[in-house]
Amino acid sequence: MTQSDTGVADSGRKHRRPLVNLGGLSRFFPILGWGREYNSSILTSDLVAALIVTIMLIPQSLAYALLAGLPPVVGLYASILPLIAYAVFGTSRTLSVGPVAVVSLMTAAAAGNIAVAGSPEYLAAAIALALLSGLILLAMGLFRLGFLANLLSHPVVSGFITASGIIIAASQLKHILGIPSGGDNLIEIARALFAHIGETNPYTLAIGIAAMAFLFWVRKGAKPLLARMGLGARMADLLAKAGPVLAIIATTAAVTVFGLADKGVKTVGEIPVGLPPIALPAFTPALWSDLLVGAIFISIIGFVESVSVAQTLAAKRRQNIAPDQELVALGASNVASAVSGGFPVTGGFSRSVVNFDAGAETPAAGAFTAIGIGIASLFLTPLLFFLPLATLSATIIVAVLSLVDLRKPLELWSYSKRDFIAITATILVTLVDGVETGVLTGVALSLALFVWHSSRPHAAIVGQVPGTEHFRNVRRHAVLTVPHLLTIRVDETLTYLNSRWLEEFVLAEVARRPDLKDLVLMCSAVNGIDASGLEVLESLNRRLADAHVRLHLSEVKGPVMDRLERSHLLHDLSGKVYLSQYDAFEELAGPAAETAIASVPDIGTEREEARL
Amino acid sequence: MTQSDTGVADSGRKHRRPLVNLGGLSRFFPILGWGREYNSSILTSDLVAALIVTIMLIPQSLAYALLAGLPPVVGLYASILPLIAYAVFGTSRTLSVGPVAVVSLMTAAAAGNIAVAGSPEYLAAAIALALLSGLILLAMGLFRLGFLANLLSHPVVSGFITASGIIIAASQLKHILGIPSGGDNLIEIARALFAHIGETNPYTLAIGIAAMAFLFWVRKGAKPLLARMGLGARMADLLAKAGPVLAIIATTAAVTVFGLADKGVKTVGEIPVGLPPIALPAFTPALWSDLLVGAIFISIIGFVESVSVAQTLAAKRRQNIAPDQELVALGASNVASAVSGGFPVTGGFSRSVVNFDAGAETPAAGAFTAIGIGIASLFLTPLLFFLPLATLSATIIVAVLSLVDLRKPLELWSYSKRDFIAITATILVTLVDGVETGVLTGVALSLALFVWHSSRPHAAIVGQVPGTEHFRNVRRHAVLTVPHLLTIRVDETLTYLNSRWLEEFVLAEVARRPDLKDLVLMCSAVNGIDASGLEVLESLNRRLADAHVRLHLSEVKGPVMDRLERSHLLHDLSGKVYLSQYDAFEELAGPAAETAIASVPDIGTEREEARL
């Protein structure tokens, strides 16, 4: 049987970069892959999904534009061309891109550093952020830099999203209360809210509270109710997700009928009718350089979120996504947003789940959604004149509070103190100083803790288990050792982060053994040795020679040995390289092996328990 | 036989933090340890060493002050109190602290950003740098942050020192030529030199070239010559090291006798006679905040250099040093330098080697050296009036060129491309943009390459070796697999840097196996799982369940299992945890095991060769 028959060994060759489709051009234009298999049954599924997503997206797009401090119509603009770009380049069949909560908050923070919300400069900054994020994502995709997203550990992302959710909810209270406010972090927001709390508009507050209560109830209670009314589970689920649309219709009607706009209830007001204006963003290098850091954060956070959603959905149907191509697709979507007057977009969780549940089968559903939003912005916007901002804020608050997960830090406390520190610091710094400092703190702290932990790897002094060829930790087992021979088992890959530690460890052990003549480093668990590790081995070899101790290696893995053969170490080594630790012990312990001393295990020490 | 008799298991308990002395107070004041054993024989050795080091240090101190852009006398000031502070706090018996080349260059770069060399503000900045470095080092010692020095990989340090050596040598050409010049990097220095090359002073040039030629010859030829003249090898070596002193005496005499100072040869001139003024540095927070970044670099580079020298020397006599306490000692030395009008100091290679070779046995030799320098600054300085700056520059150039190692990048090219990139980038950026950017680039690039490499760990699809309980890579061995069962062996500790990769790898493999029912992750090589790794396992578990694939684990190590038991994973797991992979295969392959397919190994694939 040949390997291609098995399907296993053959697939192995490709597993470096999972191809979504047939390779070649379709790797860069996945549309060429799924487009070929398109038929009328898929078309029907995609059209139905597009209709449902369009209805859901209209309020969501308006709301997230509001959250980003932009005119609501910009949210619609950001929900048309980006979806078409993603349909061409994206590798997820069901991901729905557009404005999302966290990225909208980050847009507000970055643009807010440049201009006052509502000004033309602010809008220009938001468009420039979309353009820059798009270019950064494209560059990351072309240069395969997606791995940089790994710097965002799960605790940092989780903490960041929790803190962002709290900030977003707090920032929307101003619309619920009908008062002016602002700020990029919890302290600024709270201060601004308290300063104006006396100006609360009772009608606005009533609408806001009613909308929030309804939306919270829809989340929990609507589905069982609809199911009792005889609807299928899936239909009930989808109808429940349309809750925001109902809230919008009801509150818009209330404002219109009771003339509440005259009583101080702020509404969306005039929305320009028509499709988004297509234009290249102005060439403004000074503005771009001011926005660069913000754009980098938006790109990476958006990418991490989007890939995570895409993977979750793809796995359900055993489909696959290609992260590097996703960078290209999100980059193209953001550039498309920028040229059509939109703001930064990414793959959103709730909209993608709706798309998936509604039966979307290909990215064409996204393109149809774009057409739907286009039609809405042509004909529907006048109906939104009396839509109260409080309702949009209520939908935002209800959506983002589901992102807040304050139990996570507690779970991490019991699982890993390092990760607990990372998540707690990320949450606190984000709340107190805003999104950019928060992410940066989380990333830097995670790295520092990782470096700290990596710089103290495990190594054990080992001896021979009597009567066997096995060698075990002297502190856990009764094993044989001889005074003039020391064997240290290194339990990690040697990298620059931990090689200095190894050097200190070895030299300290040698310093306390005046009779030592031979030192063996047992390398059975060493998967690699970088140049710093090599340097340390060379320096140990020289230093031990100065102290009249020979350095030997044992059980060096094949690939590590291949590499060492390209260095001077093996030539300069004062001792030998033994295939097995047993060989080394036999030869080096010599006649003294008979006088070997059995150590008594000493299990309960602090270090073993903490680190093993 | 009890464990304390063996001396092995007992020492194990202490190996976390090698104690230099008897513990307690002497850990923080090593002087209490060696001071107790002090006797007249040690005193004699220390006094002889101190005399030799003093003679060598006088020209070196003056030269490095010149390199730092400071009045020569500041070099003497920085060679008195710091040595006494190190004698009290240091854990190396033979390390000699004081001004060193690279740190002097970094001082010049940092102070040069604040003021013009020669101005009182420049001197104040240099003193403030010593104070800040001292406080940073002390803080790092108290909070045990020495591990941060691990961020400086060997290639980065090596590249940085090579580039610094080139910059230093280039910067000293102005004194050899007797022309004005300046600049923090090679380009600035070259530009300034070319602008003034026409103003070269022939007498200065003659002195400079003669001094350089003599010093290079002394390095290579003096020792054999002295040995032929009947001197012992050690004496010949020490006398050869006194070459700079001879050069100074000869050229000073020449300038005095021939009245060359009147012909434009620049000399040291008037040096204030007396001990350094002891004064607390002025409280200047604005200046400190400007110098903070420079001080951080000086602290960490100085620490890395010093510890490396101290370890080399300690190992020769099977002594030991305590890196965290070294931070305290170097911190105290720098604070001592600051309060006595000096500039940043650290442990120097050449001076420590001289101290060691001259027979120093305890840090008291350093204290005696301090007294020697103190006497010199009281009585000797008038003799240095006609010492030409060209001679001092010649000693600097000859000393630093020995630090330049341009073969290192070539060696790394063949050993590790990643490390080659790191060293080359560090050298080039340091040469072109100066020391701070150079170090920063090296550190950032090393980390990025490390993250990149860590984010693509090795994992292999394994199958059963027929007739055994062993499981091997399907691409290297003829092994048995069944279509509905996939086993993936993970060959790394799961951290946030690589867990996303694992998720993509697993989901891609699952996506191409429509018949898959069970997935086993074989964890024999997984030494740990951080919270991000746990999150990925939990998410894989959910996603695979959605795709009707059960997730199992096998061969989980004890400590990893202990930790997993504190999480939800084991409770939520769709499959089981098997003690051995063989158990898992037996149970899951079931009757289908008989229809198992033998894969054909496929050794020559690119990925295996590049990564395994």
Image (cartoon, coloured by chain):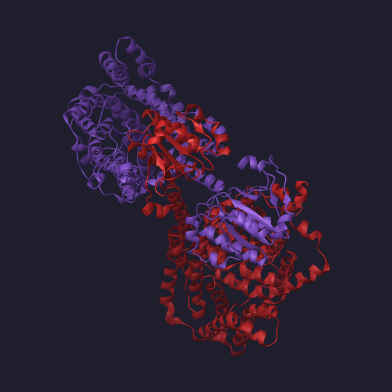
Chain colours: A purple, B red
Q: Name, please, the residue furthest toward the top.
A: A229
When asked about the image quadrant of residue A117, the answer is: top left
Q: How many marks?
A: 0
Q: Is residue B385 left or right of residue B466?
A: right
Q: Name, please, the residue furthest toward the bottom.
A: B258
Residue B176 percent coordinates (x, y): 51, 79
Q: Is residue B360 left or right of residue B342?
A: right
When asked about the image quadrant of residue A373, the answer is: top left
Residue B172 percent coordinates (x, y): 51, 74
Q: Is residue A352 left or right of residue A442?
A: left
Task: Tell me if residue B90 can be seen.
Answer: no
Residue B512 percent coordinates (x, y): 32, 38
Task: Tell me if residue A332 can be seen.
Answer: yes
Q: Name, please, the residue furthest toward the right.
A: B40
Looking at the image, is A470 positioned above or below residue A507? above
- Quadrant where the N terminus of chain A is found in the figure: top left
Looking at the image, is B105 positioned above or below residue A204? below
Query: Looking at the image, which residue is at 50% across and 27% down?
Result: B571
Residue B467 percent coordinates (x, y): 47, 42
Query: Looking at the image, which residue is at 58% across and 70% down?
Result: B64
Query: Looking at the image, which residue is at 49% across and 72% down?
Result: B171
- Quadrant where the C terminus of chain A is found in the figure: top right
Looking at the image, is B446 positioned above or below residue A29? below
* Residue closest to the eye, A600 or B219: A600
